[in-house]
Image (cartoon, rainbow, N blue to C red):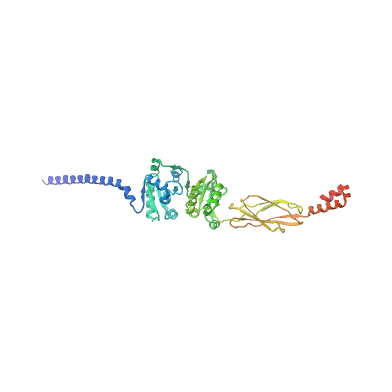
């Protein structure tokens, strides 16, 4: 009897448990279905960020009347280069890999760069942009965050415009590999920091992939920007700054102005470069100029002299020339490092002279003086004029050609 009671209780408990599971599952299924239908509305009411469909994102990003929203792609470099959304300036897409947002230093750069702005995060399907959204929220991002549901896949499925190319973010290690091996092509590192920062120190890589300097302010000047676009047309460039913020601004300026070349951005900047143990140098003075030309001549005649100096940093050079006569010093330039310049000069009086020249780079660093000693012993023009006068007064001298030759040409 006792066994039967226990058996019935056990069956009853199992039955109740099964009914509970079935009922609970039905309730959960209802809740899941309800949450799925209301999820978008719920998230749109969230104070921290707003989910958007690709159509809503497109409407935002093609009308500046509703403010400026910056779309930010958090996919990998390779995904970004293959295809990304296409929206007009100034709401064109930017790129900031998720793994960079997961780095404390890079995250702070992002927070500073987009401080107070409205941003639209997107990725391939939506997962990574959701993670990026929460990273920014957790770190109290000061701006408005939109998350584009469905990502690049939904954008393409909706038939919205795409483009390829753009820029690629690289680590300092990847930059070092590129800049020390010309087998992968020629990449030109371009430092966009201030003059003072460049003078103090900059990355050191061998020619022909040695660093160049173009301040961010120059790229924000229309005339200088056009000069930059022409100078580096079709080239591969690597943009660097102190820690990454200014180089991404420079990157976006070039993209906005349809730079015809390949852009790499080194987010770690010279700070990351130095921390990785890669070489740096301060700005260096130009080498002493060499001067070549006639060292023995005649006063009053014009001679050509060649001046050339190299700059270790390949900076633009100016030359200060002193002819050691009463003409004083002259300054000529600008010239490329290693570019030969030819100047003409004549000395009115006979004597020994020392031509002196020094080179100065754009930052004011001066070379030592280069010198060339010249000797101008005789003024043939004066002698020629004197003898011409004698012939006019004494025409009989013309009967003695040997004497005339000795007088005129000796």
Name the foreground residue: 218 vs 318.
218
The residue at 44%/42% (across/down) is: 162
In the foreground, 155 or 141: 155
Q: Position of residue 48 (x, y in %)?
A: 36, 53
Quadrant for residue 196, please give it: bottom right
Q: Nearer the viewer, residue 14 or 76?
A: 76
Q: Is the residue 193 above or below the residue 21 in the image?
A: below
Q: Quadrant of the N terminus?
A: top left
Given residues 335 and 200, the one toward you in this image is 335
Numbered circles on residues, count: 0
Give the x, y percent position of residue 158: 38, 41
Q: Is residue 99 left or right of residue 316?
A: left
In percent of width and height, residue 139 lies at: 39, 55
Residue 211 in sight here: no
Spot the residue most to the front.
Answer: 65
Q: Is residue 8 visible?
A: yes
**Residue 52 x/y as whole percent:** 37, 47
Q: Is residue 113 left or right of residue 212?
A: left
30 horizontally vs 60: left or right: left
């Amino acid at each position: 009897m006792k066994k039967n009671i226990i058996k019935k209780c056990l069956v009853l408990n199992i039955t109740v448990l099964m009914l509970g599971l079935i009922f609970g599952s039905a309730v959960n299924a209802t809740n899941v279905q309800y949450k799925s239908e209301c999820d978008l509305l719920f998230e749109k009411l969230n104070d921290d960020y707003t989910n958007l469909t690709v159509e809503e994102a497109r409407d935002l990003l093609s009308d500046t009347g509703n403010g400026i929203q910056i779309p930010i792609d958090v996919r990998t470099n390779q995904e970004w280069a293959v295809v990304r959304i296409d929206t007009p300036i100034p709401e064109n897409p930017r790129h900031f890999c998720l793994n960079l947002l997961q780095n404390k230093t890079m995250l702070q750069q992002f927070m500073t760069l987009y401080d107070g702005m409205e941003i639209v995060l997107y990725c391939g399907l939506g997962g990574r942009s959701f993670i990026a959204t929460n990273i920014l929220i957790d770190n109290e991002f000061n701006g408005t965050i939109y998350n584009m549901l469905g990502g690049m896949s939904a954008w393409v499925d909706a038939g919205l415009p795409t483009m390829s190319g753009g820029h690629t973010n690289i680590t300092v290690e990847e930059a070092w590999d590129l800049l020390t091996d010309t087998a992968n092509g020629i990449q030109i590192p371009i430092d966009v920091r201030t003059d003072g920062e460049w003078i103090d120190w900059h990355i050191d890589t061998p020619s022909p992939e040695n660093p160049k300097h173009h301040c961010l302010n120059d790229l924000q000047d229309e005339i200088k920007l056009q000069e930059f676009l022409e100078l580096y047309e079709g080239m591969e460039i690597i943009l660097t700054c102190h820690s990454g913020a200014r180089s991404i601004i420079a990157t976006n300026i070039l993209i906005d102005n349809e730079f015809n070349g390949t852009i790499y951005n080194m987010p770690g900047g010279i700070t990351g470069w130095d921390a990785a143990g890669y070489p740096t140098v301060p700005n260096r003075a130009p080498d002493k100029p060499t001067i070549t030309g006639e060292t023995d001549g005649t006063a009053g005649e014009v001679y050509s002299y060649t001046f050339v100096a190299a700059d270790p940093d390949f900076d633009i050079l100016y030359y200060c020339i002193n002819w050691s006569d009463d003409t004083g010093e002259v300054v000529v330039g600008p010239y490329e490092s290693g570019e030969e310049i030819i100047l003409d000069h004549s000395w009115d009086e006979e004597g020994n002279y020392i031509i002196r020249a020094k080179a100065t780079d754009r930052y004011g660093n001066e070379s030592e003086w280069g010198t060339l000693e010249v000797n101008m012993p005789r003024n043939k023009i004066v002698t020629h004029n004197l003898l011409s006068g004698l012939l006019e007064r004494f025409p009989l001298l013309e009967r003695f050609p040997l004497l005339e030759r000795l007088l005129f040409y000796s």
